[in-house]
Image (cartoon, rainbow, N blue to C red):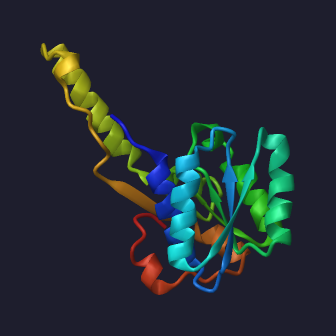
Amino acid sequence: IFFRAIETDAKRLELLSEALPTGRKFGFLAAPTLEAQRSEILARTAATLGVSLTTRIVQSPADYAGAFDAFWADGAAGVLIMGSTIFSGDAPLFSQLATERGMATICEWDYMARAGCTLGFGPDLVGLRRLTGDYVARIFNGANPAELPIQLPDRFTLAANLRVAAKLKLQLPTVFLARVDEV
């Protein structure tokens, strides 16, 4: 089962821009593993949306506050958190740093929105587990693992944390909320 966060980061930027329609500047918090291709896709997406995107690469959680300070000083309306396992457990810290500075966040997973990011968007984890279970069952029933096709996620979820949005005094557009899978 394979998915690339490179493309979903671009979709997250699009969703953040839709959620904050007056926002013209956004930050991108990136891990040291940031690939040139991801940066290029995000730059094209930002240009298409007519917004600017400032990237800050952080080495560890100790660098987060400085990055959020830089985004705030630059006038960012929101911060896109790079889709990476490095950041998967840090949603409460991102929420605290962003809320203190009055910025929204969009993270990779729906559970990250439940943990404090303003928005979360990524492959449906329950669906990925089902695909994994299906593969295990096929193998136990005699399928050759080398002959099984690579699967891509077929469902993505968008979550919005309205408690965090309220702290930011952010009114998410009704049209945007209509698309949200979990509030």
Total numbered labels placed on residues in the image:
0
- Examine the rendered structure and indicate whether residue 84 appears above or below residue 99: above
Q: Is residue 159 visible?
A: yes
Within the image, what quadrant is residue 125 found in?
Answer: top left
In the image, residue 177 lies at what x, y percent? 46, 77
In the image, residue 168 lies at what x, y percent? 72, 75
Q: Residue at x 52, y 77 (%)?
A: 49
Within the image, what quadrant is residue 138 found in?
Answer: top left
Q: Residue at x 69, y 54 (%)?
A: 29
Q: Residue 51 versus residue 124: which sits nearer the camera?
A: 51
- Examine the rendered structure and indicate whether residue 176 appears above or below residue 103: below
Q: Is residue 160 visible?
A: no
Q: Residue at x 65, y 57 (%)?
A: 116
Left or right of 7 in this view: 131: left
User: Residue lying furthest left in this view?
Assistant: 142
Q: Residue at x 83, y 66 (%)?
A: 100
Q: Residue 135 versus residue 12: which sits nearer the camera?
A: 12
Left or right of 80 in this view: 2: left
In the image, residue 160 lies at what x, y percent? 53, 67
